[in-house]
């Protein structure tokens, strides 16, 4: 499918280190937001499945993290084993590839990897945010398999209270997406 280019959006993505290190995530920022000085922060996290942007607002630094978790949960294992000192992370979002009854009403089991994900979110003072309408974010090609919720958003408590996610659609968001 490839990456979508549009003149009204700036795309941030990590350059591959080797031929088998293609980035799995990109972040798109509207060109009307240059005063926030968005910056890709590979000096803090340089991982093919994690993209970290910082930006300035009223003199304070804030962060956005977009992730992709493969079937081995490499991103979750990396974040669990890495000590990061990131204050003001507002959003950690996208494709976590974990099925769990906590966020998928059609799935009746709890995944142990979800515990690691919640510990990571908690270390950043983030909370799972639920969309106003609970819908699948992955649609199965097989009619015998259920659709599922794999795309999630963890956000800062202030953002969670103020937005109720009405301005962000998980899965297909023009701001943050995975490749």
Image (spheres, rainbow, N blue to C red):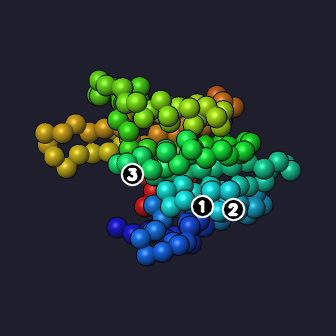
Circles 3 and 2, Cβ within 8 Å, touching? The answer is: no
**What numbered label is drawn on residue 43?**
2
Task: Identify the residue shown where x is 57% and y is 37%.
Answer: 120
First of labels 3, 2 by sequence position: 2
Percent x, y for residue 32? 68, 62
- Seen from the viewer's position, the closer of residues 61 and 34 is 61
* Quarter of image, res 39: bottom right
Percent x, y for residue 98? 38, 39
Categorize mark 1 by other alpha carbons within 10 Å: few (<14), some (14-19), many (20+). some
Categorize mark 3 by other alpha carbons within 10 Å: few (<14), some (14-19), many (20+). some
Image quadrant occupied by the N terminus: bottom left
Task: Identify the residue shown where x is 55% and y is 59%.
Answer: 47
Circles 3 and 1, Cβ within 8 Å, touching? The answer is: no
- Seen from the viewer's position, the closer of residues 73 and 149 is 73
Q: In the displayed structure, does residue 74 sit left or right of residue 158?
A: left
Secondary structure beneath dot 2 equals: loop
**What numbered label is drawn on residue 46?**
1
Circles 1 and 2, Cβ within 8 Å, touching? The answer is: yes
Distance from label 1 to label 2 (Cα)? Answer: 7 Å
**What numbered label is drawn on residue 70?**
3
Percent x, y for residue 55? 73, 55
Distance from label 3 to label 2 (Cα)? Answer: 23 Å
Secondary structure beneath dot 1 equals: loop
């Amino acid at each position: 499918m490839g990456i979508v280019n549009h003149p009204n959006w700036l795309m941030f993505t990590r350059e591959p280190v080797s031929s088998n290190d293609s980035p799995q995530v990109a972040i798109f920022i509207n060109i009307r937001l240059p005063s926030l000085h968005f910056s890709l922060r590979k000096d803090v996290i340089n991982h093919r499945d994690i993209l970290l942007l910082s930006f300035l607002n009223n003199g304070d630094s804030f962060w956005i993290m977009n992730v992709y978790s493969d079937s081995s949960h490499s991103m979750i294992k990396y974040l669990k084993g890495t000590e990061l000192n990131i204050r003001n992370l507002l959003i950690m979002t996208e494709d976590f590839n974990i099925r769990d009854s906590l966020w998928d009403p059609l799935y009746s089991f709890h995944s142990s990897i979800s515990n690691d994900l919640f510990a990571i979110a908690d270390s950043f003072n983030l909370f799972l945010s639920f969309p106003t309408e609970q819908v699948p974010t992955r649609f199965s090609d097989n009619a015998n398999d259920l659709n599922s919720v794999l795309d999630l958003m963890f956000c800062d408590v202030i953002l969670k209270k103020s937005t109720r996610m009405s301005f962000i659609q998980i899965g297909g968001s023009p701001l943050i997406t995975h490749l």
